[in-house]
Amino acid sequence: MVRSNLYLERAQEFFAFQYDFVALALGASVIVGVVCGLVGTFLVLRGYSLVGDAIGHATLPGVAAAFLITGTQHPGALLTGALLSGLLGAVTVGVFSRGPRVRSDAAIGIVLSVFFGLGILLVAMIQASPTGTQAGLTNFLFGNAAAITAGQLQVLAGLSLALCVAIGIWFRPLAIVTFDPGFGRSLGLNVSALEMGLLAALSMAVVVSIQAVGVILVAAMVIIPPSAARFLSRRIQGVALWSMAIGGVSGAMGAFLSYLFEGVATGPAMVVVATGFFLLALFLGPFNGVLATALRKRRAR
């Protein structure tokens, strides 16, 4: 009884936004879910799901190197290092995948292993230094949405909005290249540039997400929402909208659960909620297809 009253009290505090960090964490989690869902749509449909995992892990050496170079835990410096390292990882995956001697799955595995190994080495160097501390780096490893400040949320929102607008402008070419690169070439599209642009967008999405979700789990938010959305729509526009909705709701519920249950981090909670949506969509998918078929037959009459 006492525990249930405690949970009720914490739930009321959350929805009343009594503390500023609650609103900041909620906003960051929702934005991360929406952005990852949108970018992940093209990756999952293209068969590049694990690229998100590779680029997520590739940001770690950038974060550690930025700390070693600047000697500070300023989020701007650490995120800049993460972005540069993530872009380097994305370019490496793209270059290796196009070569005839390296399979795409091997290229992804190489980038993931090498970059993450380098990142762990740099983090160990930071720990071993007399004045070193990894307190600021832990948030990037496992995520800490509650530690996001108002200024960081504004930057995150601005970058996410720019990313969504850019994808919206190039949505049709990206959709064509996703399903049929050969057809895209016949239309005069620069397929290589679009694919590299998509990898760059993924790098940006990962960078804006790691402070809330963490390097370890960011790939899950890129993969799970669009994977669930595939069962709910057969059109790429529908998959993208469903994926963004599932990602956003997962972010909101993850932030709520992390506040409701003490000691539960926002990132893992978001992933668990998204997984629940995936399982629900997996079971509802066949019924959705039957319903769509019935509606088409009715319209045909």
Image (cartoon, rainbow, N blue to C red):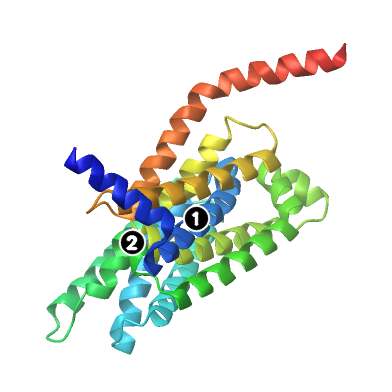
| Residue at numbered disc 2 | 143
The answer to which of 273 and 207 lies nearer the viewer is 273
Tell whether 48 sits left or right of 289.
Answer: left
User: Around disc 1, counting alpha carbons within 10 Å, would you say few (fewer than 14), some (14 to 19), or many (20 or more)?
Assistant: many
Residue at the image position 24 percent from the left and 44 percent from the top: 5
Tell whether 229 sits left or right of 138.
Answer: right
Residue 30 is tagged as 1
Q: Dot 2 lies on which element?
A: loop
Looking at the rendered structure, the kind of residue marked 1 is Val
Given the current orientation, which residue lies at the most extreme right position? 301
Q: Of the residues tagged 1 and 2, which is closer to the observer?
A: 1
Quadrant location of the N terminus in the rendered image: top left
Residue at the image position 40 percent from the left and 82 percent from the top: 77
Query: Can you see residue 227?
Result: yes
Looking at the rendered structure, the kind of residue marked 2 is Gly
Q: Is residue 278 above or below residue 151?
A: above
x%, y% of residue 160?
57, 65
Q: Would you identify the image quadrant in which residue 164 lies?
A: bottom right
Query: Can you see residue 58?
Result: no
x%, y% of residue 26?
44, 58
x%, y% of residue 136?
27, 74
